Image: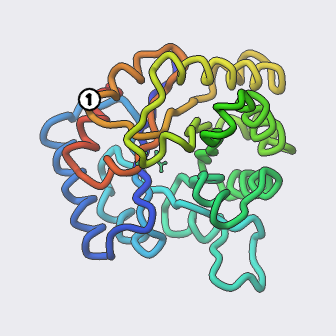
Amino acid sequence: MRNKIVAGNWKMHKTLTESQALITEIRGIIRDEFRANTAEVVVCPTTLALPSSVKLVEGSSIFVGAQNVHQETQGAFTGEISAAMIASVGATHVIVGHSERRQYFNETNSACALKNKSSFAAGLTVLYCVGETLEERETEQHWAVIEKQIEEGLTGITSEEMHKMVIAYEPVWAIGTGKTASSAQAQEVHAFIRSLLNKKFGEPVAEATRILYGGSVKPDNAAELFAQPDIDGGLIGGASLKARDFFEIVKAAG
Ligand code: PEP
């Protein structure tokens, strides 16, 4: 039985004070209304808010993650942060390969593989994002694109390290657009990703790996998506910026 995950990606939103207010609100709602939550809840605020967010969730069941990491452990890489730096402030998760990073910062599958590897070395859990563009879906290239993202992005990753790997399927055409993949469309791709993991790492790893769906998940579509056999939770953008909406999505995950 895979434990579901709901992770909020706050992207470049919220100042430090606003981040602190939002995380406090999320923590409060979960504490007051849904103490028995079984899903793993992760919030990924701006890097600047990581240390204070970690303090604000202390004693709760909420984890804090970063939105990006550099693949090297240290060096002359102005503006970047390493996995060890993320871990040093008490954050436990990191998003790798988000489509916005692939699109605007030219992040490649092979760079993602290195980021995944260095994140595992620092003890972080990785939320590795894959997914096709609208054009790739319309031309039926999405299977090949996703296979390449999995194959290349997991290069050099061991079965042992896969225990700390979570895959997030995020069709680019559904991110921030209000268009969600239907639960059937998402399930089809999730099952495909699991079959790729089976081929690469064997059945026990494939069956144990959580695969999240991301792309306009909202309180009113979360339950149906999360009920699919291969959908193990969600990576949430826009709706994670509203405490009540995020909470409703957490509740849908159980
Ligand atoms: C995302 O950016 O990872 C995402 C899924 O965004 P949204 O929920 O806003 O579509």
Closer to us: 147 or 36: 147
**Residue occupying the point 40% across, 16% down:** 227
Q: Could you tell whether 32 is left or right of 101 in the image?
A: left
Is 94 above or below relative to 211?
below
Question: Looking at the image, what colour scheme do you see?
Answer: rainbow
Q: Residue type at mark 1?
A: Asp
Q: Mark 1 sits on what residue?
A: 220
Q: Could you tell whether 162 is left or right of 186 in the image?
A: right
In the current view of this chain or complex, which residue is farthest to the left? 32
Secondary element at tag 1: helix
Closer to us: 189 or 76: 189
Is 189 above or below relative to 68?
above
Closer to us: 50 or 145: 145
Q: Could you tell whether 121 is left or right of 28 in the image?
A: right
**Residue occupying the point 86% across, 44% down:** 156
> How far from the left and from the top, in percent, is residue 200?
83, 26
**Residue occupying the point 34% across, 28% down:** 222
Q: Could you tell whether 183 is left or right of 118 in the image?
A: left
